[in-house]
Image (tube, rainbow, N blue to C red):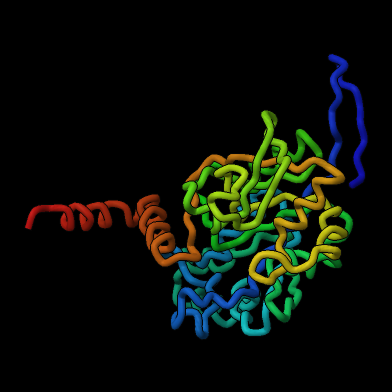
Amino acid sequence: MIRGMILSDTGSEITMVQPVRTAVFPVAGRGTRFLPATKAVPKEMLPVVDKPLIQYAVEEAVAAGASRLVFVTHSSKGAIQAHFDEHSELEDALLYAGKQDILAAVQDILPGGVTCHYVLQGDPLGLGHAVLCARELVGNEPFFVHLPDDLILSDTGCLEQLKARYEETGCSVIATEEVPADKTSSYGIAAVDDDHAIYKIVEKPKPADAPSNLGVVGRYLLTPAIFNELENTGRGSGGEIQLTDGIAALMGHEKVYAMPFSGVRYDCGSKLGYLLANLDFALQREDLAAGLRAHLARLQAPQ
């Protein structure tokens, strides 16, 4: 990473870092936990209220400054590209029908100046492999990795929070939260020092082997040095190339920080998490909240 050091008026060092322009979205997974709904519809296109998961992901990345969106995808996921492409026939129909509010929502899916790029992963060999597939498009720059399954409701986007920490340190930053001790085998688990620098990270350890209960969630800001590590990372947990293992190797050359983010995470890769996300996001909507609260009150009333 290109980085310079200058002195402030107080004599303290300020780290000058490359801006983060690119966000990578690994979306090649099959979504088997939501079959049969995902037999023909990518899981990333499942809606939370009236917006697909992948659009929430893109909006978070764009809000954090990303202008290049890289989708690591599969040949069966054409609906994702179609969602972000222009649809002139639909727009003309909405315009003719006078449905200006819906037309605006369709036209604002992707802001001006933001570009989409697609690369096929082929065989699903793990998250680390998916990130490695984006190497040519990312180039020698820091970049975000966003997993759309992890939907986060927050005042400030999680990627924006990661970027603030990156700008302080010039190092990779990973979003984390405390998880139940008996659930460590579902997460990458990180152990950190007093400054939240990671000194150990393990993919899906059994509870007895977990170095902490600090779980890695689906937001990363990584320096391009990760690509060299992933090239040399063999298959790990589940027979896949794990991003966690690449990060562990990266820690041998540069610091990697954990960041407990502010917000509520919904695991939309699970049915319960997906339902809770729909409920809570709907309660944030002025046009839906009153009716939904009334319905919930009726459900709780004695029969």
* Residue that extends furthest to the top in the rendered view of this protein: 10
> Where is the C terminus found, in terms of image quarters?
bottom left
Asked whether 88 or 122 is in front, the reply is 122
* Residue that extends furthest to the front in the rendered view of this protein: 208
The part of the image, by quadrant, that contains residue 193 is top right
The part of the image, by quadrant, that contains residue 98 is bottom left
Residue 104 at x, y percent in the picture: 53, 64
Q: In the displayed structure, would residue 66 be above or below residue 161?
A: below
Q: In the displayed structure, would residue 227 be above or below residue 75?
A: above
Is residue 264 shown left or right of residue 261? left
Residue 259 at x, y percent in the picture: 64, 40
Is residue 238 shown left or right of residue 40? right
Asked whether 43 or 199 is in front, the reply is 199
Is residue 120 shown left or right of residue 95? right
**At 27% across and 52% down in the image, what residue appears?**
290
**At 86% across and 36% down in the image, what residue appears?**
16
Task: Count the numbered circles shown.
Answer: 0
Look at the image and tell me whether residue 199 can be seen: yes
**At 47% across and 55% down in the image, what residue appears?**
266
Look at the image and tell me whether residue 157 can be seen: no
Q: In the displayed structure, would residue 252 be above or below residue 242?
A: above
Q: In the displayed structure, would residue 139 be above or below residue 193?
A: below
Residue 58 at x, y percent in the picture: 62, 60
Asked whether 90 or 20 is in front, the reply is 20
Asked whether 266 or 288 is in front, the reply is 266
Residue 138 at x, y percent in the picture: 82, 61
**At 8% across and 53% down in the image, what residue appears?**
302
